[in-house]
Image (cartoon, grey):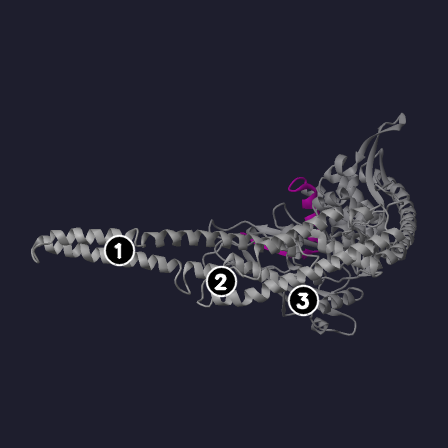
Amino acid sequence: MKNDDNDDEITIRFAPSDETAAGFVAVTGESGSGKSLLVSKAIDLVTGGKVVPSLLPSSSGDSRESETRVELVVNLAEPQLSSVSSSLRNFGVDPKILCNEPSRSQLHLSRTILRADASGRVKSLCRINGKHVSLKTLRSVSSPLFTRVDVATASAALSRPVSRLAMIDTAVSDVLKRECMDSKNEYERARKKRRQLEKQLDERVLPVGMKRGGRSLTEEDMEMLQHWADELDQFESRINTFREAILVQYNELMADVYNNGSKKSNLDEILQKLRKNTWADAEVSEDASLFANLLGFRGEIKAVETKLASANAAYSMLSSMSSPDFAAVALDKVRKLLYSMARDDNGPLFDSIEKTHDLLNELEEALNDCARSIDGGSNSVISVLEKMVCPGISLEQIDTIVADWNSLARKHGISPYSLPKCHESLRQELDGNAEALMLLPAAEQDERLALKKYSATCKQLSDARLIVASSLSKSVTEMLPSLGLDGTTFQVQMSLRTGGFDDPYCGSESLGVDIADFLLLHQKSSSDSGSQSGGNIDQVGSSGEKSRVLLAIETCLPGSIGTVCNAYTTSSENLQYNAVKAPPLAIVYDEIDAHVGGRAAVTMAKLLADQTRRQSRTGTQIIAITHSASVAAIADQHIVVERSPAQSAEASSKVRVYSVDGSERSKEIARMASGDLASGEAQAFANALIRDARQAGVSNSHSQMH
C-alpha cells in the first residue's frame, strides 16, 4: 500500500521469504496502529470495495499528492485459477495475462484512488497484471477470492434469513439444490405461459350477451356471433370509405391552405392522426383510437363552420357601412359642408379643410380594404375558411357516422372506443383463432405437473435441511461451554413459508419454502433443566456471542462464512446455489475475537487453527487481526503493525510492518498479555503459550498469499 502524499510505501508479506507454510497468519499491534486499515480495508479496496474520502490524504492542489495506491499479488492454483480465468473471459480479458507457469499463475491487482475534483469525489484507476480494467471487472474477478469477517458482518450474517439458510445449505447436496432450482425455473416458465394465455383470453372484448362465465360458445352463440360480425364488417367498410374520402379531399385542400408556410392548425394535426390510424388498430389507447380522432375531426369542422359564420357576419357589417345608404352618403354630405366653408382657396382654414378631405378619402379606402380582407381575395378570411370546409364532407355526415358508432357500441354493451377490439375478438372466435383456448388446457396441465415436481423437490430439500439443522444444533451446542457459554443451547429452528409445499415460494430471495431461525437459549437454573430463556440470536446475542457462534458454525459447516460474508456473493442468487464455486484464497478475520477473553479466547484460537488445517486442502489461508495472545501464539506466522509517534507537529507518524519469530514473537505476545506490567511473568506466559501451541501440533502447510 502506497500513499503518494508522503511517498510512504508499506509492504506486507503473508508468507515467509522462502514461501513455506504459513496457513494461519496473526496480525497484531497496539490499538490505533492501523492493523485493520493495512490488511482488511486494503484487501477490500484492492478487490473493488467502497472508497471513503477520508482514506485519502488532504490535497494541496496537485492531484498526484492525493493518490493512494493499493496492490496485491497472489499465486493462483486450481481451483481458483480456473475461476479467475473464467471471470476474465467474461469481461473480454485474455487469461494469458496471468503469467502462466507449469504449476501456478500469478495475479497482480492494483487500484489507484485519487480525488476527481475539489468537491472531494474520488475515482479509481484499476489494473490486473498491468492491464487497465474497469472497477466492475476488478471487483468481479478478485472479490470472490477473499472473504472478510468482522463483528459487524458476523452480526449481519446471523440476522439475515437468507444468510442463515445459505449456511445450512453448505452441507446440502449440490445435486439436490440444482434439481430444486431447475424444477423451480420449470414451474415459473409453465406458470408464466399459462398466465399469458389467460391474459390473452381476458383481453378479448366480446358482447355482454356472450359473457356467460365460461370460455366456450354454444351453437346459438355462434349464429348470433356471425350476425354481429357481419354487421361490424359492413360498418368497418363504411368507416374506411368515409376515412379515405376525408383524407383524399383534405390532402388537396390543406396543401392549398398551407402553401405559404403558415403554421399548422389543430385540424391538420387531427388529419395527420387519421392518416396513421385505422379501424384495424384495435390495440391503441382510447385517446389515440379512430373513434377519438373522428370526434376530434368533428369538433374542428364544427369550429371552422362557426368561424365562417362569424366572418360572413363581419363582412355584412362592413359592407353595410360602405353602401350608398350609409357611409358613402355620409361622407358625401361631409365633403359638401366642408366645401361650403372653403370660400377662399388659401389661408389656414383652407389648409385644414384640405387635410380633412384627404383623411375622408383614406377612411373610405380603408373601409373598402377591410371588406376585401374578409371577402375579396384568395387569402381573405372567408376564402381561407371555405377551403377548410370540404363540400364533400358535411357535419351532418360526421354526426351520422358517430351516432351509428355509438348505437352499435350500446347494442353490444361496450364502450365505443372498444368497438374495433370487439370486432376483432368476434372474428377470432369465428375464424377459429381461439389458439389461446386450445393451448390453455395443455398449459394448465404443464403447470400442474411442474408445480407437483417443484413441490416434491422442495420437500426433499426441506428434509435434507432438517437433518443438517439437527446436526448443527447438536454440534454447536456441544462447543458452547468451551466458548464461555455454559448452560446455553444453540438451536436451528426450521419452519415453512406461507403457502408451504402446496404453493411453494418462487421469489429470488431463497430457494424452497424453508425459513431458518438461529436460537440461543439459556437455562434459567441448574435445578430446572426444562426452563429456558432467550430467542433469536440476532436479537438476544451480544457481539461476542455472535462472533463465537459464527465461528462455531464455520467449524461444523466449513465454507459457511465465505457463503454469507463474501462481498461478491451477497446477492440472493449467488448466495444460493451456483453449483461450483472456488473457495477463497484467504479468509480475513478482523478482530472477530473482540469482546472475548479467557477460556473462550483460547477456544476461538483453536477453532481458527482447526479451520486452517481444513482449509489447507483447498488452498485457503486464514488471516486473523487480533488482540488475543492465544490467537497470536497458535498462528503459523506472526506479523506486527507498529506506529511510531510523529517527530514534530508537521510530520506524520510512521508505520512499520514486520514479521516476528523466536524471542521477538514472545515479546509481542507478552505485550499483548500484560502491556508494560509484570514483564518477566508476561514473558514466561508468552513462552508457555507458544510452547503449548507447538506441542499441540497446530500447524499448516500451504501458503498462497503475498
Q: Secondary structure at mark 2?
A: helix
Q: Nearer the viewer, mark 2 or mark 3?
A: 2
Q: Quadrant of residue 661?
A: bottom right
Work out which quarter of the rendered image holds the N terminus and state it.
bottom right
- Residue with the mark numbered 3: 108
- Residue with the mark numbered 2: 387
Count residues near mark 2 (Cα–Cα under 10 Å), then give few for <14, some for 14-19, many for 20+.
some
Mark 2 to mark 1 CA distance (whole Å): 31 Å
Magenta stretch: includes residue 666: yes
Mark 1 to mark 3 CA distance (whole Å): 95 Å
Q: Quadrant of residue 428?
A: bottom right
- Residue with the mark numbered 1: 363
Count residues near mark 1 (Cα–Cα under 10 Å), then give few for <14, some for 14-19, many for 20+.
some
Q: Position of residue 303 (x, y in %)?
A: 51, 52
Count residues near mark 3 (Cα–Cα under 10 Å), then give few for <14, some for 14-19, many for 20+.
some
The type of residue carrying mark 2 is: Lys
The type of residue carrying mark 1 is: Leu
The type of residue carrying mark 3 is: His
Residue drawn at (42%, 58%) of the image: 381
Seen from the viewer's position, the closer of residues 375 and 567 is 375
Q: Earlier in the sequence, mark 2 or mark 1?
A: 1
Kindly tell me whether residue 705 is visible in this rendering: yes
Q: What's drawn in magenta, residue-wise?
A: 653-678
